[in-house]
Image (cartoon, helix red, strand yellow):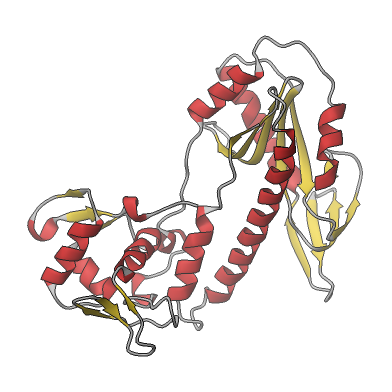
Amino acid sequence: MIVKPFTSSPFILGFRALIMRLPPTHPQFERLQQELKIKEAGDFGEHYIMRILESFSSLQDFHALHNVILPTTLPMQIDILVVTPNGIILLEIKNIRGQVRFKNNPRQLIRTTEKGDTTVFTHPEVQLEQYMQAMHQFFETHHISMPIYGAIVFPFNNATIYHEGDGLPILMGKELPLYFHKLSGGKYKQSVNEITRIILKHIRDRKPFPLCDYYNIEQRDLHKGILCENCGQFGMQKLKKGWYCKKCQHVNPHAHVGALRDYYMLVGGTITNRDCRYFLNIDSPDVAKRILQKSCAKRSGSGKYRKYHLSSLYRHR
């Protein structure tokens, strides 16, 4: 059964907002576009594998969890974790097209596209081995005794794979049912339900926000104002009935919510009246105050130092 369903990477919503508000001439613009494509491809692959695992939903002793972060000494963010009576399986999902070569000494993943472009990545086996070691530490802390396995999974048949030497299994998505079936059984002290309960209790949430700090981007480099969802242009004006776009005459009474969400993901989790006026490109402190009071349930401080908390506007899908 799926006990922690798929959720898209928080990076994706943030990247889209950042790219929309950065001018194409910004030195990091192309890099961010490329990183967004990688994140979207990764999400697509992980979602596909989770759908494959749903086919095991009738099995009571098969629990799948997406995007697992646990408090360990070694950094650990597992794409998909599966708990079975035969062991814990950590799946590292790689949705990569083209010719893929897993090289040893040193361990590298080398991808060659149809156009002949070559990109070198860290061998996913290195990362997966670190996650497995971190999982061992977590199990020792919580007195769990059960084998830990790891596998690198390509969701689709869109890559030609060459692998040097031995190492962790490299599987295609459709091979997963057979891989799970082949795992040897054993009798262990803790049940699948108990282990899953311990993991769920200690799962951590990690967000990369604010992205401007993460990527060392100055706030002044961002486009200010309200984005028109109809024509994709900034500069909507505040009227009594809402926000009005001069270019396409579109009216949206709640257009400011998207801008405040952008601020949360890009600049910071709290905002003052002055910051609101600057980012939304409005002049009136009273208008800014009304917007913030209606949009933010939590606030702290008083007077010009009052800060409005924006976390409630962020919806992780």
The answer to which image quadrant residue 174 occupies is top right
Residue 250 higher or lower than 255, as above or below: below
Residue sitting at 73 percent across and 19 percent down? 85
Residue 251 higher or lower than 110, as above or below: below
- Percent coordinates x, y for residue 72 in the rendering: 54, 31
Q: Which of 267 and 178 is in front in this view?
A: 178
Q: Nearer the viewer, residue 40 or 6?
A: 6
Q: In this view, does 133 lie to the left or right of 205?
A: right
The N terminus lies in quadrant: top right
- Percent coordinates x, y for residue 302 in the rendering: 9, 53
Q: In this view, does 306 lie to the left or right of 111?
A: left
Q: Which of 16 and 266 is in front in this view?
A: 16
The answer to which image quadrant residue 63 occupies is top right
- Percent coordinates x, y for residue 7 in the rendering: 55, 48
Q: In this view, does 263 lie to the left or right of 239?
A: right
In this view of the protein, can residue 187 be seen by the observer? yes
- Percent coordinates x, y for residue 52 in the rendering: 74, 43
